[in-house]
Amino acid sequence: MSEKIKNAPSRGPLALVSVFCLSLCACESIVDEREQYSLSEETTHSYLDSRLDFLRARVEEYPKRDDYHYQIASVHFEKGDFNLAVSSLDEAIDLRPDIPRYRYHLGRIYLKMGEIDSAEINFRKAAELTDAQRYSGVNAALGYVLALKKDLPGAEAAFRKALVAEPDNPESYYFLGAIYDLQGRKDDAVKHFREYLARGGRQYRSNALFYLEKLGVEVDTETSAQEKE
């Protein structure tokens, strides 16, 4: 998802718009990867319906296989049937409550549905079940939801945990910069936007440059030239 920078009288709304992009940059897709063909919409629906029939048959044969419910949820998600996807993930969780990715993807679906509180609950549970030293996505997603709820201290803490797992990920520096900007912490905001640029961040480079300019920071011409390329 590309971002459009709009001139605004205050920096707060712009920062929240920036944080909104986290849902795509930090969260992996629930949909199982498969080869991409040039399929018509009719063919795509036919494929998904056939996939559902196959998976439901497997559930009948192996009722204790939690992964089949997870795969069914992915098909419902791809079809846009989010309530059915939630139901299938709930069944997977009932069978294996110890698997964090089920809670993580359930949080993503609730987020897609606009049910922010339910998304937070599931991202928190996924974070509890995940080794914070190994994977940044869950805490990044939690930070995004907390930013939406304007819990900036909580969002900051979650993004900092994401950095522990993946210290070279430039996006976490960017979102921390946006959070600090919302809090009026200029020095911290500048530091993290600079870190984002220094670590080769590309997706939000124009926004980072915009922020730094608005914060009164001069950006070297080489960095500006890289943005224009």
Image (cartoon, helix red, strand yellow):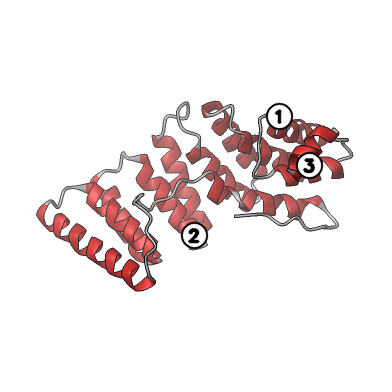
Q: Which mark is residue 81?
A: none
What amino acid is at disc 2? Answer: Lys
Mark 2, secondary structure of its residue: helix
Q: Is residue 170 above or below residue 83?
A: above
What amino acid is at disc 1? Answer: Ala
Front position in the image: 144 or 54: 54
Q: Specify the quadrant that holds the N terminus.
A: bottom right
Front position in the image: 89 or 54: 54
Q: Is residue 134 above or below residue 127?
A: above
The residue mark sitting in front, 2 or 1, is 1
**Residue at 87% across, 36% down:** 217
Q: Which mark is residue 198?
A: 1
Q: Is residue 229 above or below residue 34?
A: above
Q: Whole-percent x and y of residue 140?
A: 55, 40
The residue mark sitting in front, 3 or 2, is 3
Q: Which residue is mark 2?
A: 112
**Crowd band around label 3 with a 10 angstrom C-alpha radius: few (<14), some (14–19), many (20+):** many
